[in-house]
Image (cartoon, rainbow, N blue to C red):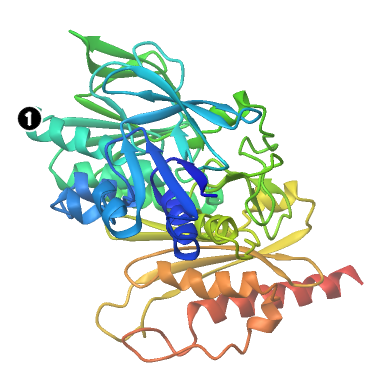
Amino acid sequence: MTERLIVVGGDAAGMTAASQARKRRGPDDLEILAFERGDYTSFSACGIPFFVGGLVEELDELIVRTPDEFTQKQDIEVRIQHEVVGIDTDKRTVTVTDLATERDYEESFDQLMIATGAEPVRPALENVTAEGIFGVQVLGDGVAIRKMIEDESPARAVVVGAGYIGIEMAEAFQSLGLEVTVIERSAEPMSTLDPDMGRLVGEAMRGFGITLHTDESVSGFVTEDGHVSAVVIEEHEIPADIVILGLGAEPNAQVARDAGIPIGPSGGIKVDRRMRTEIEGVWAAGDCAEKFHLVSRRPVAIPLGTHANKEGRTAGINIGGGYETFPGVLGTAATKVCSLEVAHTGLMEADAAEAGFEFLTATTVSTTRAGYFPGASEMTTKMIVERVSGRLLGAQIIGEEGAAKRIDVIATALWNEMSVEDMLSMDLSYAPPFAPVWDPVLITARKAWQKVEEDQVEGR
């Protein structure tokens, strides 16, 4: 008898799961039906700022596979502009709204894959729903922002929040010639960095001509004829023609919560290592699902496409009758603002303290290439290590071209639970166009281990 898999969400996790399940089970054995509330499937949300800024010219470049391609190549039916608004785990049905006709109907399932992603944080502020105020989460958001820029030629952009999306959108607007202001409620930009490293990002942003307000909170928006005209902070206004809310994202788990599917302490859907929820035959993956942090050993919600694709693959293999597990995450990520590259992996100082670690930190300033080689530029590397053992807990890197991807070496060491002593003699490549003879990763590991040894001596 043919089983039916329903997939809720048509992007990375959902469609990867569908594709992996299809590889293992043909259409006579497993019917696959996917619902996507937007207009696009399998797209690169990470590419949205670059599409807005014009570095990516055509929308199609961000789309991996269209609904028609899923149908024709894999026998996976995809219904776009259809939102799953209810799940009944007893009846094994979902309630779906056809957003084009506003008609509700039910579909039955044997297996259910929930991949509803994350929702941008949109605070309950006056006029927050006005025209010209955008979140950045799905491809349709990028299309709407770019259309407004082309149709209305805004001159002043305000970005609320200086996280990944915020600084990338600030760069996109600046590259288009807009006057850009970024408002951040914390003392420094980039909440995924320690304040001393975030300060370097802030200094660079100001140096690039971006106006940055820190320690400021938005209290509302001013509108004219329904369109945003200013952002209100601390009782004064910043004129704005277009506003981006870059306040982060939260797991979009409400439809699962309403169905009684257990939610973890991070706010994401609780899953095991095979991406199973506590309800038989119900799976979850991607930004809506809770992750296990391999260093803090705690449940976390980290919205990253890398995680979503891996979790979707894991779920799909298991739905297809295979066996696969997803061990957890480090939260490794990188971004850029103008020529500055920013990357991190593992725990920040605050995370390490919250997880109960006693730790030391080491920060070095080196160069991306041999110092004498043309194009060599400064980069700052910081490592956080456990006292006594010297076990690596996390790291952050800030620098010019060639800096950010070095985080992958550190993430590999972190994944394998290495100490900084273990890292001292790692055989990393060297050539003047790519690195100094002592790579910045090794320099920082050496300094961190020196601090561990000094701390041991002082503690005797």
Residue in the foreground of this view, choosing between 78 and 435: 78
* Relative depth, front residue between 1 and 143: 1
Label 1 SS: helix
392 relative to 286, above or below: below
- In this rendering, position of residue 205 left or right of residue 351: left
Where residue 82 sits: x, y (%)?
A: 35, 30
Most extreme residue toward the top is: 225
Reply above or below: 244 against 339: above
x%, y% of residue 363? 57, 66
Q: Position of residue 215 (x, y in %)?
A: 48, 31
User: Residue 84 appears in which quarter of the rendering?
Assistant: top left
Q: Is residue 150 visible?
A: yes
Q: Is residue 102 left or right of residue 275?
A: left
Task: Say which residue appears at 55% left-offset and 80% top-offset.
Answer: 443
Locate residue 23 relative to residue 450 in the image: left or right.
left
Residue occupying image coordinates x 36% and y 41%: 166
Q: Identity of the amino acid at label 1?
A: Asp
- Number of disc labels: 1
Instruction: Give the crowd class for mark 1: few <14, some 14-19, many >=20 residues within 10 Å.
Output: few
**Front one among 115 and 76:** 76
Give the labeled residue for mark 1. 151
Q: Is residue 109 above or below residue 241?
A: below
The quadrant of the picture occupied by the C terminus is bottom right
Picture residue at 42% right of the left edge, 14% below the top: 125
Mark yes or no: residue 365 visible.
no
What is the residue that sits farthest to the right in this orientation?
A: 460
In depth, the one of 342 and 53 nearer the eye is 53
Q: Is residue 411 left or right of residue 33?
A: right
Give x and y (percent) for residue 242: 22, 27
